[in-house]
Image (spheres, helix red, strand yellow):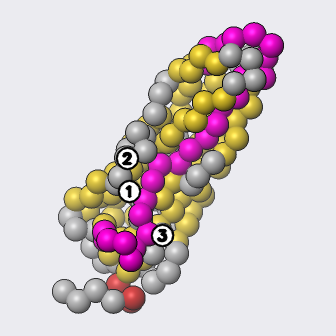
Amino acid sequence: MKIDDSTICFALAVVLALVLASQARAVTVTKGDDLAFGAVLSGASGTVTVPASNGPPVATGGVLLGGAQFPQGGAASFDVTNDTASPATYALSLQASPSDLGSAGLALSNFALSQNSVTLGPGASQRIYVGAQLTLSGALLSSGPHAATVPLTLLAQ
């Protein structure tokens, strides 16, 4: 199959709209990177998994295009900062539902955090990564960047 600009969906990214539900301690969460799945082949079927370890995406079904000429994917990131004057431990969890991303044949699921708790000194920060799985079921996507916003709740206790 010849791959040209009409069959490539560049930079398929998901903007995680963060909702912080903080209980008991002062904490600040600052958004870093969006969740990016890289360049996928329009019309293909398979999955792309971006691990919460911020490793490279893993694909099934030949949907992900590799190489220096294509954008690469990566996990979303957030910085969690302790706003108290003493050390604090925060238990972290996600509340996210599978999402259809607004295009037939695209679904997002299996959200994961790089760690479920952090212990931080006063004013200290820790970067947390969020991964997920994208399922493509023959979605016909136009060439160019595509993005969707998915609500995500991070619970810090």
Give the percent coordinates (x, y) of residue 133: 37, 50
Q: Is residue 80 magenta?
A: yes
Amino acid tagged 3: Ala
Give the mark nearest the N terminus, 3 or 2.
3
Callout 2 crowding tier (Cα within 10 Å): few <14, some 14–19, many ≥20: few
Q: Considering the numbered disc 3 on the image, is that residue within a helix, a strand or a loop?
A: loop
Quadrant hosting residue 66: bottom left
What's drawn in magenta, residue-wise?
65-90
| Residue highlighted by disc 2 | 55
CB contact under 8 Å: marks 3 and 1: no
Q: Is residue 45 above or below residue 125?
A: below
Q: Considering the numbered disc 1 on the image, is that residue within a helix, a strand or a loop?
A: strand
Give the percent coordinates (x, y) of residue 113: 47, 34
Amino acid tagged 2: Gly
Res. 139 visible in picture:
no
Q: Residue at x 68, y 16 (%)?
A: 121
Give the mark nearest the N terminus, 2 or 1.
2
The answer to whether 47 appears left or right of 22 in the picture is: left
| Residue highlighted by disc 3 | 11
Q: Is residue 124 magenta?
A: no
Q: Quadrant of the C terminus?
A: top right
Quadrant hosting residue 147: bottom right
| Residue highlighted by disc 1 | 134
The answer to whether 82 appears left or right of 77 in the picture is: right
CB contact under 8 Å: marks 2 and 1: no
Q: Residue at x 20, y 64 (%)?
A: 61
Callout 1 crowding tier (Cα within 10 Å): few <14, some 14–19, many ≥20: many
**Distance Cα–Cα, label 2 vs label 1:** 15 Å
**Distance Cα–Cα, label 3 vs label 1:** 13 Å
